[in-house]
Image (cartoon, helix red, strand yellow):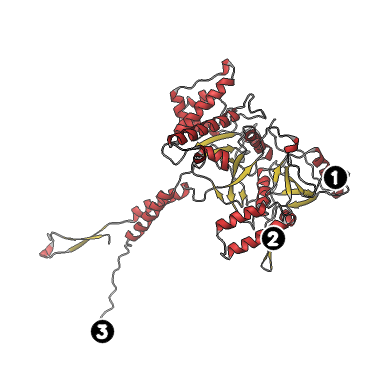
Amino acid sequence: MAEVQEHDSGKKKKGAQKKMTIRVDFTPMVDMNMLLITFFMLCTTMIKSQTLQLTLPTNEKVQKEQQNQAKKSEALTLILDTEYTDNNLPKTDEATGKTVHNVYWFAGLPDTTFQTNLLAKESFMGDTKENGVKVQQGIRKILREQNKDVMTNYDELKAQWKNREISKETFDSLAKKNAADSTLTRPVVIIKPGPNTTYEALINALDEMQINQIARYSIQLPTHTDTLLLENYQQRTGETVIRPTVRKSVVY
Amino acid sequence: MGKVKIKKKSTFIDMTAMSDVTVLLLTFFMLTSTFLQKEPTIVYTPSSVSEEKVPVSNLVTILISSADKGKVPEGKDATEAEGKIFISFSGGMDSTQVAPVIRGKMLDEALKVYNAQAKDSKKIALTDAQKKVFQETNMLGTSFEYLPELLSKSLTEIDKEQGDMYNPNTGIPIDGNKDKNGHLNDFQIWCRAIYTVSKELHDNMATDMGLTVDEAKTLGDLYNAITKDGTGIAIKADKDTPFTTVETVFDNLQTMSLNKFSLMTALTSEEEAAPAKH
């Protein structure tokens, strides 16, 4: 292909015409192209970042009556915490290489007499498979249990979508409706990131809300009551839960 | 019986086909590539199951720097580099809304708000050349007071200075002001400017096209993105950034009534749905 046949003018011995082939060596061209490809491959962002939508309430003063008070039976509080190493860096789990985030949770209202609704410790864990069936673990299992009315419907919808009975759009809108269905028993989750929490822990918690189709949740800062509950947990289990704030916090 | 002739074979490999392939690949990459926007610092976003894509246009990105994981200068603490705030804006796909133009408008608006509340000695004015430099930079994070000095420098110098997280002039100042009508901090001034400019553009576009208020709502512009869908403002923070740092930004946005926004994440599956490996 890259050859051009040319007739020699035949000034050589015997006067015979000799066919000469001119070959163009494409190797440097390929080399250069490869370099360019490498450059473009490294410079491009093929995978686009994802986003997570978040709507927070305004800071404007809201009247007491207008405030949504979570019902005692529906409330579920998650207190987040990230463990740090002595080097002031988030601690990673050696087996998985993931940052260690703890979730302390209780259902209902906090009980400062420490009789009921005590804190329990969980962590963010992905799903596993047991005999081919998806099994939830960690905090996801608890949230799923709390939101089981919605999740049962959601799983049905998902199965319909997987079997191509409904389109993705229909599935999305039905799932949204289902998550917001006030006739079902749905929890109100209060996410409380502690002073040592990293941004990742918050994203993990918001992710769990999405996975478990929890439509009502809020992000709040921990209160004194939460500290008391953590202290109680510390006394009960002997674990060190309350650690000094290791990172500088932003001055308010 | 004839002799076995050993044919001399040329080792020349025809590279034409190879060249064709590489050119095709090259064309593909050139056409599909969108260049990484230059950012003053690198952050590793946490992973999430959310599948919503970051919009290409009409996006205000708020970057929050993370603690320095590289070489820390002597006598400095790695966390000092944390929590510096930068704002960038990428314009609409529509050719009438070119990003630098809107950026220029935002700057004018922000200066107006700043000068209205600043003391006489602290009021600032920018020359056209300085404004031009601002329009050309993708992402900036500095106080208004330092802005004239920074914008007098060349683009390379600005890049270098903005990339230094230990520089006290790097990052937009932010504090806990909760009064929308009170003395705004620099970050809130930018928020106000972004809101005002996007609303102005939205209203102008609606009148230009002769649309009613209801019809105008469907315009896919920044104003709708920040007030309605929450896709207009994206917060980009490192996964190891303390929540308190991010919370300050949330709080300031809430104060400015920009309480719908998105958080930039990387995709993960539900099975994993937990932090990615380091």
From the image, which quarter does the C terminus of chain A lie in?
Answer: top right
Task: Indicate the amino acid at tag 2.
Answer: Thr
Answer whether labels 3 and 1 touch (C-beta < 8 Å).
Answer: no
Disc 3 and disc 1: Cα gap in Å?
Answer: 106 Å
Query: What is the number of the mark on residue B262?
Result: none
Which one is in front, A77 or A47? A77
Amino acid type, label 3: Met
Whether residue A131 is visible, yes or no, is: yes
Q: Nearer the viewer, residue A196 or B69?
A: A196
- Residue at numbered disc 3: B1
Q: Which mark is residue A152?
A: 2
Q: In the image, is A142 to the left or to the right of A228?
A: left
**Marked residue nearer the N-terminal end (2 or 1):** 1
Instruction: Quote the CA–CA distance across marks 2 and 1.
Output: 31 Å
- Identify residue for label 1: A111
- In the image, which is nearer the foreground, mark 3 or mark 2? 2
> For the residues carrying marks 3 and 1, which lies nearer the camera in this image?
1
Give the residue type that dot 1 points to. Asp
Q: Could you say which quadrant of the image residue B63 lies in? A: top right
Residue A252 lies left or right of residue B98; in this view the side is right
Name the residue at the left extreme.
A15
